[in-house]
Image (cartoon, rainbow, N blue to C red):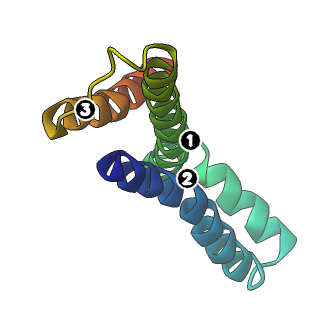
Amino acid sequence: MDICRSSLAMADALASLQPLVVITYNFSWSMNMTPLEFDRSRLALRGSPQAYAAGFAFLFGITSSMYHLTYMAIERFYAVAKPFNYKWQSKKSVYIGVTVAWIFSAIAIAIST
């Protein structure tokens, strides 16, 4: 489960640090502009590759975090519901579960955009 928790931590870091960096950058960037310049630059960024990349990274972090938590909840439910049939997961099955969580989140974001 340490592998799953560390992968979840990476997903959470991606989801939480990205807005912090973007907000700090945009705040410092907007303080040096007039309102008219600010409006023009915001309209120029609308629909740009930068905007899509930032949106993808933010949503990817959130959905991957949700899929990791779902994977961990299902694994824990199975361990509680069937304690005598439950075997400790091998590293291979944990790696597969974590990989599936990342892939499903990428697919979900790709479909939604």
Specify the quadrant of the image occupied by residue 16. Answer: bottom right
Give the labeled residue for mark 2.
Answer: 15
Extreme-left residue of the structure: 92
Residue 73's place in the image compared with 7, above or below, is above
Give the residue displayed 85% in from the left and 70% down from the top: 35
Give the labeled residue for mark 1.
Answer: 62
- Secondary element under disc 1, as helix, strand or loop, is helix
Give the residue displayed 42% in from the left and 20% down from the top: 83
Specify the quadrant of the image occupied by residue 71. Answer: top left
Query: Which three-letter amino acid code belongs to the residue tagged 1?
Result: Ile
Specify the quadrant of the image occupied by residue 39. Answer: bottom right
Query: Which three-letter amino acid code belongs to the residue tagged 3?
Result: Gln
Give the residue displayed 61% in from the left and 66% down from the top: 22
Pick whichever, 7 or 85, lies toward us. Answer: 85
Distance in Å between CA atoms under marks 2 and 1: 5 Å
> Going by the image, does 65 lie left or right of 7?
right
Residue 79's place in the image compared with 53, above or below, is above
Mark nearer the viewer, 3 or 2: 3
For the residues bearing labels 2 and 1, Cβ distance under 8 angstroms: yes
Point out the tag, 1 or 3, that comes first from the N-terminus. Answer: 1
Distance in Å between CA atoms under marks 1 and 3: 25 Å
Query: Which three-letter amino acid code belongs to the residue tagged 2?
Result: Ala
Please identify the quadrant where the N terminus is shown: top left
Give the labeled residue for mark 3.
Answer: 89
Q: Residues within 10 Å of mark 2 (few under 14, many from 20)?
A: many
